[in-house]
Image (cartoon, grey):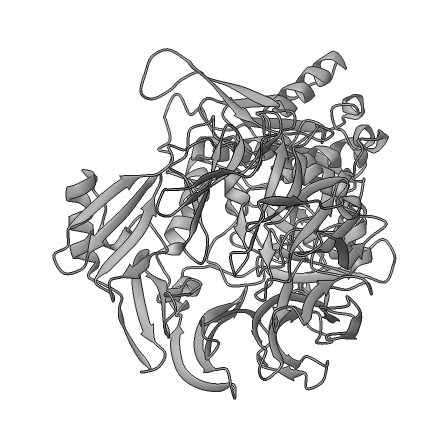
Amino acid sequence: MCKVGALILALLAQQECKAAHGLVDEVVNASVGRSDYERALTIENRYGRLTVNVPDVPFWLGEGEAFVYRRTTQGKHQFMLVDADRGSKQPAFDQAGLAAALNRASHKNYKPEDLPFDHFKLTDKGGKITFNIEHTHWSCDLVSYACTGNAMHSGTYQQSPYDDTPPAENDPDKTSASPDGKWLAYIRNYNIFLRSQDGLQDIPLTWDGAESDYYALSTLRWSPASTHLAVYRVRPGHQREVHYLETSPADQRQPRHLTMVYPKPGDTLALLQPVLFEVSSRRAIAIDNAAFQNPYGLSAIQWWEDGRGFTFEYNQRGHQLYRLVEVDAATGQARSLIDEASKTFVDYQPLVMNRVNTGKTFRYDVDDGNEIIWASERDGYEHLYLFNGRTGELKNQITKGEWVVRAVYCVDPIKRQIWFGASGMNPGEDPYFVHAYRIDFDGKGLTTLTPEPANHHIEFSPSGRYYVDLWSRIGVAPRMVLYRASDNAELMQVESADISELIAAGWQPPLSFHAKGRDGETDIWGVIHLPINFDQRKRYPVVEHIYAGPTGSFVPKSFSASIEPLTQLGFIVVQIDGMGTNHRSRAFHDIAWKNLKDAGLPDRVLWHKAASAKYSWYDISNVGIFGASAGGQNAVSALLFHPDFYKVAVANSGCYDNRLDKIWWNEQWMGWPVGMEYSQSSAVDNADKLQGKLLLIVGEMDRNVDPSATFQLADRLIKAGKYFDMLYVPGADHGAPGSYTQLKLLEFFVRNILEQITPDWNAEPIELPKSKSGHDG
């Protein structure tokens, strides 16, 4: 008897030892019921109602020293106005009064605590507020609380967000006035005319304009002294159209056919060429186009203040050369001031503080272009450089190191100082955390402004006198602080969020984790969303939420009460930024070039294996993956090219062949001319490689990614004898948003990873909540 008792005690001790060291044997496979699905579909909304005073990103009003932010308390929104000069804070306006006025004018039922906008402008010295709701511009008097709405562009599908060709206009009433007030430029029969302000003179400047080669009024820019004008002459490109059949329009019974101009890789683009005119002689001054022969695009014409010439930025087709071009007003001679060249790609989108979509170009002209501050990755990291604007010679590199500039907040040409955001400067810290810094033009005096180990979002006032710092971490509630820029003095603790009730309800932040990538040296960063009722003595199946679009990074760094719904069904959900994504070194980013099928998947697999080795509760025996847009392409690539690791995928609205998707995204990363790399990365051309379980989701009215990409993949899978599931959502736009789509995703992983039968929803329907839209990309 004593021996048996001793044996029992020994076994109990052994189990305690296993638990203490994370040694587990049980794999979680608890039955998932209707209530679990309901919780998964509603948990984010419930958690969002448990936070207090969580501020959104602030925005400054006009040219003054006041800013506004929207804060959320228990799901209710309130706009707050802060006067930086006075150090005061108050409600921005009477939200109940505005809601009532807006409801009277719109015949809607908006609630004061949930007004349908997050930004606005104040006019008439604060007496009026203006904002946009869908396709209507609203103006409301804040004294009488009366609102008037004016329809903006209809936003129909025929209007394309992808074709930025300047329009041909032949309306004499549309004019461009000279700065001296003497002349009005306009277009007639595709030619430029000058009309005197008194109407007595009407003079043609050109005779050679035509529908196929016209002068575009929207591009015309007068010199400051009105002695010259410059304009782009436009030869239109191929107008490729994507056609839609809206099968179930809400306002009529019959289907509706719609079209949208949608240029794709390899298409012939519009050709823009600058033309210079001397007003007094009415003569055109020839401009040699040798410096910009093959444009993907030319930026807006910008005159120097002294009228000596004008500049524009030339983005060469193929995105391997980006050039600042200057044209001399007297001679028309064009020259390159600054060249940005790459053997892979120049990320030509603007450098802005955006985690998901941002580029690398920045230019600031100092003293009418005597000097130019320019952003570049020429040393392998995104940094700032100071050029002589007259000669184009490099004066000095302003920022330098194995870290990256993420944004430029403010430039003071008098003090010759720059306030900027950067990440990766602090050893031992998450290299994606953004901090604010100040530095002198000569590269000296680097000063840290945000010591807190967190992700900081900075907004400077228009004058540059003040800035607001909104900072947090994934597990630390947001704080908003107002500072004076001149000495970095803290002026006001604007807001401090309270998440104690959220934590008490069981919310837990993601676990940050990093591991070495494919080169054995570079740290790959990600987060682990733990499942409900997490018990480290058990093992949990893993599903990766992927978005490997090279435009940005995806892993959250700031606080959010949002939660991955799959965690409510017993899954671990992870997010990872593998090589090929943005905000690290140039070499890190270059992995994506002509290689979008890569998606950082080799790094992700290693990351998963490292997490499994460290955490005994991390089960990678049957890994799932899902994503939307670029993430949809990535999810399919996981099954095609890494089927030994990834077993189940849900792909939503993916660009599965980059030849079928919009031109700007795909020529940027896959190159031009269209080469064999497009086929190598194509899920359509590699459909016969499919292994595992796949669910494709597509909305019939997707205006971001051509829906034909999904259908061509489905067609090729069928022809290859591959089995897959597919959800086609009538009327849905990009991401096929909605709880029905989300429910189908949840079910797919429960069936194919947990191997459980899902409920019969038709026998007892579930009430689906309204969901947010899908991820753009």
Instruction: For residue 10, say whether it is visible.
Output: no
Camera-side residue of 442 and 498: 442
Q: Could you tell me which residue is drawn at 38 percent across and 76 percent down? A: 494
State the image quarter where residue 428 is shown.
bottom right
- Residue 761 at x, y percent in the picture: 42, 25
Camera-side residue of 225 and 370: 225
Camera-side residue of 627 and 597: 597
Q: Could you tell me which residue is drawn at 37 percent across and 75 percent down? A: 65
Instruction: For residue 403, say whether it is visible.
Output: yes
Outermost residue, left side: 144
Q: Could you tell me which residue is drawn at 59 percent across and 81 percent down? A: 451
- Residue 708 at x, y percent in the picture: 62, 21
The number of callouts visible is 0
As drawn, 457 above or below 711: below
**The C terminus: image quadrant:** top right
**The N terminus: image quadrant:** bottom right
- Residue 274 at x, y percent in the picture: 65, 44
Judge left or right: residue 578 versus residue 767: right
As drawn, 594 above or below 156: below
- Residue 195 at x, y percent in the picture: 43, 42
